[in-house]
Amino acid sequence: MVKYSFNEITGINGLQSIFKLKIDKRCQFDEFENEVIAQGQYIDEISSIYALMEDVANNKLLPKTKFRDITINKKDKNKEYEFKTKHLRVYAIKTSAGKIIMLGGYKNTQKKDIARFRNIKKTFLQNQ
Amino acid sequence: MKREDLIKSKGYNITKIQNELFRQLHEYLKTNNITQTQFAKDLGVTKGYVSQILNGDFDFKLSKLVELSLAMGKIPEVKFKNIDENEKKDSGNFKLTYLTEHRLKNQSEVAESTEVYFKNNIDSKLFKITK
């Protein structure tokens, strides 16, 4: 059976906590971040993503070009969010515990990643 | 990413400033009921320039930052502080705030001021631009 857990992102200072999802002790966002840092091409953008998370955690307004609600069903309580930089995308959901980062990806794999993100969201919520 | 790495990174610091400029301009346009087109005309820039700021992508010259601040009725102040000092406080390696200063000389005169704090690991410098 798949085990879901989440850890607080400690790098940011915010009024709200933001968490990152772990599936069977593996955190896709951490792996994505490590991949981006190892490749070296978009290191500045991964730190920009953290700046966006920090502003969101402090309830600050952001441009829709950087942070947007991508929830299809507007009545859905577990809203879906996308953090954006020029080449990177990070997907999160809102839960009663706070916002949870589910997945990180690239702009050119956005469509596939959103489908995967929604699938993870669905199974995660079913297991809560 | 660890906090100590984050606050030393270029992307984090640029994005924080760009986001703050977006919020300041967004609030200014909303409060004064001014369109982007009108603001661009008043500032003598293109609509694309204003749109870029409102997309959180400001990356222009320092002179443009000053012109933009003044056009919003605010005074920019830039402070440089050591990263080490900041790490102890753990409050981010820069702070960009817009403050309201009430001048006692003339009770009817209210000046807006902007404070931009940058911290680095070399030394502490302070640049202040006033009216």
Image (spheres, rainbow, N blue to C red):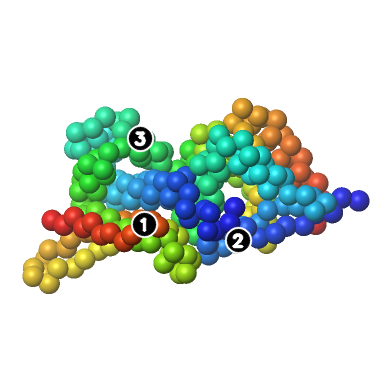
Which residue is outermost to the left?
A: B105
Residue B51, label in figure: 3
Horizontal relation, residue A68 to residue A63: left or right: right
Q: Quadrant of residue A69?
A: top right
Q: In which quadrant of the rendered image does the C terminus of chain B lie?
A: bottom left
> Are marks 1 and 2 in one subunit?
no
Residue at x 12% of width, y 63% of height: B109
Residue type at numbered disc 2: Thr
Residue A118: percent from the left, percent from the top? 72, 40
Residue type at numbered disc 3: Ser
Residue type at numbered disc 1: Ile
Horizontal relation, residue A64 to residue A110: left or right: left
Determine whether the residue tagged by mark 2 lies in a helix, strand or loop: loop
Determine whether the residue tagged by mark 1 lies in a helix, strand or loop: loop
| Residue placed most toward the observer, A8 or A43 | A43
Crowd around label 3: few <14 · some 14–19 · many ≥20 (10 Å): some
Q: Quadrant of residue B38?
A: top left
Residue at x 21% of width, y 66% of height: B101
Estimate the spatial distance between the alpha carbons at disc 3 and disc 2, rounded to whole Å.
33 Å
Q: Contact, CB < 8 Å: mark 3 with mark 2?
A: no
Residue B93: percent from the left, percent from the top? 42, 58
On the question of residue B109 being in view, the answer is: yes
Mark 1 highlights which residue? Answer: B122
> Are marks 3 and 1 in one subunit?
yes
Mark 2 highlights which residue? Answer: A10
Residue B107: percent from the left, percent from the top? 11, 69
Which residue is outermost to the right?
A: A1
Residue at x 33% of width, y 50% of height: B24
On the question of residue A96 being in view, the answer is: no
